[in-house]
Amino acid sequence: MRGSPQRILLIKLRAIGDVVLATPALTAARRAFPEARIDFLTEPPSRQVLEGNSDVDEVLLHDRRAPLAARVRFLRRLRAKGYDLVIDLFGNPRSALFTLLTGAPTRVGFNFRVRQAAYNVRVPARGHLVHEVEFNLDALRAIGVQVGVPRLQFPVPEAARHFAQEFVAKNGLSDKLLIGLNNSGGWPAKRWLPERAARLAQLLAERHGTRVVLLWGPGERDQAEQIAAAAGGDVLLAPPTDLHQLAALLARLRLLVTTDSAPMHIAAAVGTPVVALFGPTNPLLQGPFGPGHIVVRNESLSCLGCNRTTCEDGACMRELAAETVYAACAEALSSSRPGQEGRSHAQ
């Protein structure tokens, strides 16, 4: 790379949690090139992860469902921006094509099969060896950027903080010990059993006097209501939220118990300790990032980290007992917030 780039594009498509994990790379780019214009290309569901982040000048959105004519206009607009440097943090065929079509003189990406041809700075892919945060930062290191100590970023607007405060006040929770519970996940194989979630909520209420807030997303309200009914009166449903409001609500919690999902990464970004339930994914690669988190897995199984999105057996999550998860919660509640390195709890 010759000289200091004036127009930079970072690309991370798809999952909300993945975009949260890309924010340290954005911070590193801004620190290295403080005078540059830095844009970030993602997809519509992840827009609010980046809105309000002072390290990014413009959030560009690619809608895979848009008509062909609209997608062609998008590509023309992308090329017209005249980027000097494009860093593809995603590395799938679509993001590689976007990188190539920008015409940027410096195009950074990972050495994945045929699509590495889109880049002229090819980065050895260590996604199977290191956490995704470090995987992303490798792309910055490849062009000589000093990444510093990585931290997740998720700016929370004042309006969202007010939303969370109103929810807490309306439900008389200002002096309560609040724990969030999220048993869903983007993959069916990641989800925890509703009856186990209900039992955990009961144990937390009985032994710690907590109020458990059940998180839910699109299509999940019915199940959340079933968990609340089974758990009893010390459980309440979170209100419908956008990502900013969710982040503000997570910031009010003492602890979040969650599967591997976007709320897990958002909680870590806003400084809320996490007890994370893992089965088909590997917490060393995709776990909650930063100190103060605990991972719970059924270590008796040899198939952990299989990366299967569905599983007929599903023992890794199905057999994860509420009492095991409760023990991790009790440990997290007994520690200061935050400050201890993440640990692992086995069943």
Image: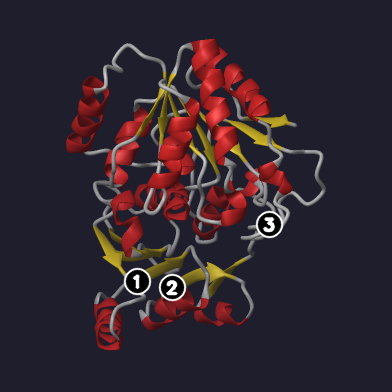
**Position above or below: 212 against 32:** above
Separation (CA) of disc 1 from disc 2: 6 Å
Q: Residue beneath label 1, please?
A: 84
Query: Residue 128: which numbered mark, if any?
Result: 3
**Mark found first going from the N terminus, 1 or 2:** 1
Q: Residue beneath label 2, please?
A: 106
Q: Quadrant of residue 138?
A: bottom right
Residue 235: x and y in percent read 41, 26
For the residues carrying marks 3 and 2, which lies nearer the camera in this image? Answer: 3
Chosen colour scheme: secondary structure
**Position above or below: 337 against 142:** above
Amino acid tagged 1: Asp
Regarding residue 206, the answer to whether it shows in the image is yes
Amino acid tagged 2: Thr
Contact? badges 1 and 2 (CB < 8 Å): yes
Regarding residue 291, the answer to whether it shows in the image is no
Work out whether residue 149 or residue 298 is closer to the camera in this orientation and state it: 298
> Residue 8 vs residue 57: left or right?
right
Residue 234: x and y in percent read 42, 20
Secondary structure of the residue carrying numbered label 2: strand
Q: Quadrant of the C terminus?
A: top right
